[in-house]
Amino acid sequence: MTEERQKVNRKAAVAFMRRAAPVVLLAVIVLVVVAACVPGTATSPGASAAATPTQTPLAPAKPGADPISLLAWLFTPIFQVLFITLVAIDQVVHDMGIAIIIMTLLVRALLVPVFRRQIVSQRRTQLIQPEIKALQQRYKGDRNKIQQATMELYRERGVNPLSGCLPTLITFVLLIPMYSVISAGLTNFNPNAMLNVFGVQVITLDCPSAPVYINGQVQPCINSVVPWLGGMNLAYPSTLFTIFGFGISVLAVISALLQVVQTRMVMPPATPGDQQARLQQQMLLFVPLISVLYGGILPAGLFIYWIVTTIFSIIQQYLIVGWGSLFPVFGFTPGFARDHKPRFPVTFDAPAPKGGPAAPGQGGTQGTMSSRTDEQRTASAASTVRQRGRQGRRGRRR
């Protein structure tokens, strides 16, 4: 029993590391890209001007021989698109907080089809899990057979297990330049060069030609103070207190809680007695809480971007998968979540039996996988395995 539990813990730990690896990689890439993209060091509130280098105007990165410069140059077009869009919206609404919210909504609206495919693929993968487990039982001990049969099942059901990679990649690709837009673009005294595309000045800001220091702080050209957030400066981290050297931000806590909600909604329902699935779910819920530790490092504006992004994802998931596995919470399921059906449920036709027409409820347009319960799918898959097993035994008797 102890060895089995150790195996379960190892498998859960591997799943956790696979989930946490992008977060760690993202943090490293952000630090590298920002170090290369920022042409000067912005002075944080309360810092001394003599303790930091003189800030230079923000300008597009140029490709160099080293990988860091090349990476910064590759991200520059994305930076400029986001920065120009953000500045243009701010010129209209005159509020950087609202400008970040509007820009985030625009970006996510453009990416609705991509993230919809990811959610649908995840849901379809969950629907065929009983059949995958039946295949694993049938070819137990033969890993190659299990992989071949699983991929064949994916093709029959029209499920692409790699469809979730593109949205994750897009999320990281946008998050890195967005960090630079807020931390570098909103703290620089003259970012006009970043508003120039192929020699055309898209937007011209009234910025000083040299940095101006007031109380040891560089005065940025763009106002990033938001009155409706208590005068919070979105270009810098905003923390309430510090615990064990980590600054705790209200926005970071809100962002982490929303990520937990988003993760629970798309998690597969826990199977009673499946300790490995339970450990994996606990670890997956732990990963979003890591973002709380970034509260004293990342600018407040980035958390507003991430909060709006997460809320948008929650709404999109709600329309496709409903409340998913969000409830019960502490054993309680509210009335509005009981027997709830999503607005756009995920459905797909089961394949017709080989050698004959589709039976009602099993193929064509008369039945869908989503219309069958998990118990029915499990029983159907198990009966298939048993029938093939009996045929094999009869064959051996002959």
Image: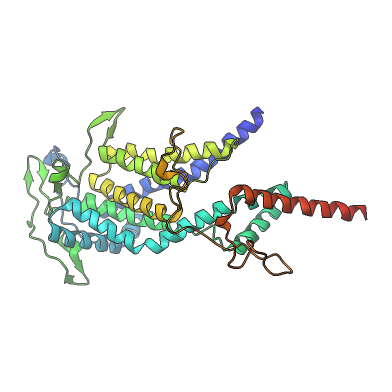
Q: Nearer the viewer, residue 188 or 248?
A: 248
Q: Is residue 1 left or right of residue 160?
A: right
Q: Is residue 140 above or below residue 174?
A: above
Residue 64 appears in the rendering: no
Q: Is residue 99 left or right of residue 359?
A: left
Question: Where, quadrant-wise, is the N terminus in this rendering?
Answer: top right
Residue at the image point whose x is 34% and y is 49% from the top: 310
Relative image position of residue 217 (x, y in whole percent):
11, 43
- What is the quadrant of residue 62 in the picture? bottom left
**Rendered location of residue 75, percent (x, y):** 32, 60
Q: Is residue 235 left or right of residue 336?
A: left
In which quadrant of the rendered image does the C terminus lie?
bottom right
Residue 147 in view of the camera = yes
Residue 69, picture quadrant: bottom left
Check the image and tell me how it is coloured: rainbow
Residue occupying image coordinates x 19% and y 53%: 98
Please, which residue is most extreme toward the right here? 398
**Total marks placed:** 0
* Of 382 and 143, the residue lying toward us: 382
Residue 240 location, x and y as percent? 22, 33
Q: Is residue 193 left or right of residue 71?
A: left
Tell me which residue sits at (68%, 57%) in the image: 149
Residue 251 image point, x, y percent: 26, 41
When the figure is inspected, residue 45 is found, relative to residue 313, above or below; the finding is above
